[in-house]
Image (tube, rainbow, N blue to C red):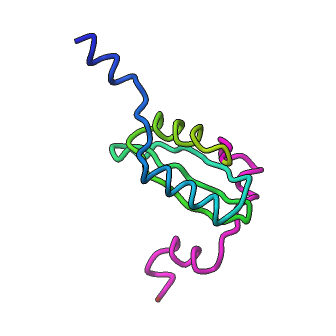
Amino acid sequence: MAETESTEKTPTEPTKAQLSAARGFVAEHGTPSKAVVERIGRLGARVVLVGADGAMGDVVVPNAETGAALVEAIDALESAEWDSDTVNATVIGAEHRRTMAGPRARA
């Protein structure tokens, strides 16, 4: 029982695919890039990436601990929160706004 409890508290390491996706984003969108780890319920956590050019991307991981480990593993990523600096660093284009608005906006 004690082994199970300690295993549940141990952060899961990010996979090679998750690391590759985050590194690729940073390579394409510049440094410094920011990363905000958000819980998304049963699915785990979402690491929202904001590039130096304002582009946004994400990597889904099993839990917030894995998200934090992902951010720590990549030197060019800095951990961030949705504060005014991070929000103002994003550049959201017209296509992204239409996508987020849903089908009624595209009619």
Q: Main secondary structure of the magenta part?
A: helix
Viewed as shown, does residue 99 lie left or right of 54? left
Q: Residue at x 52, y 36 (%)?
A: 69
Image: 66 above or below 48: above
Q: Residue at x 46, y 38 (%)?
A: 66
Image quadrant holding the N terminus, namely: top left
Q: Where are the magenta residues, as a range?
A: 77-106
Image: 14 above or below 3: below
- For residue 105: magenta? yes
Q: Quadrant of residue 78?
A: top right
Image: 37 above or below 24: above
Rendered location of residue 92, percent (x, y): 66, 70
Q: Residue at x 47, y 33 (%)?
A: 65
Camera sees residue 88: yes
Q: How many marks overall? A: 0
Pick the residue in front: 106 or 5.
5
Rendered location of residue 103, percent (x, y): 43, 80
Image: 44 above or below 52: above
Q: Residue placed farthest to the top in the image?
A: 2
- For residue 92: magenta? yes
Rendered location of residue 97, percent (x, y): 59, 74
Q: Residue placed farthest to the left in the image?
A: 1
Q: Residue at x 44, y 45 (%)?
A: 45
Pick the residue in front: 70 or 39.
70
Pick the residue in front: 37 or 97.
37
Viewed as shown, does residue 8 lie left or right of 58? left
Camera sees residue 80: no
Q: Residue placed farthest to the bottom in the image?
A: 107
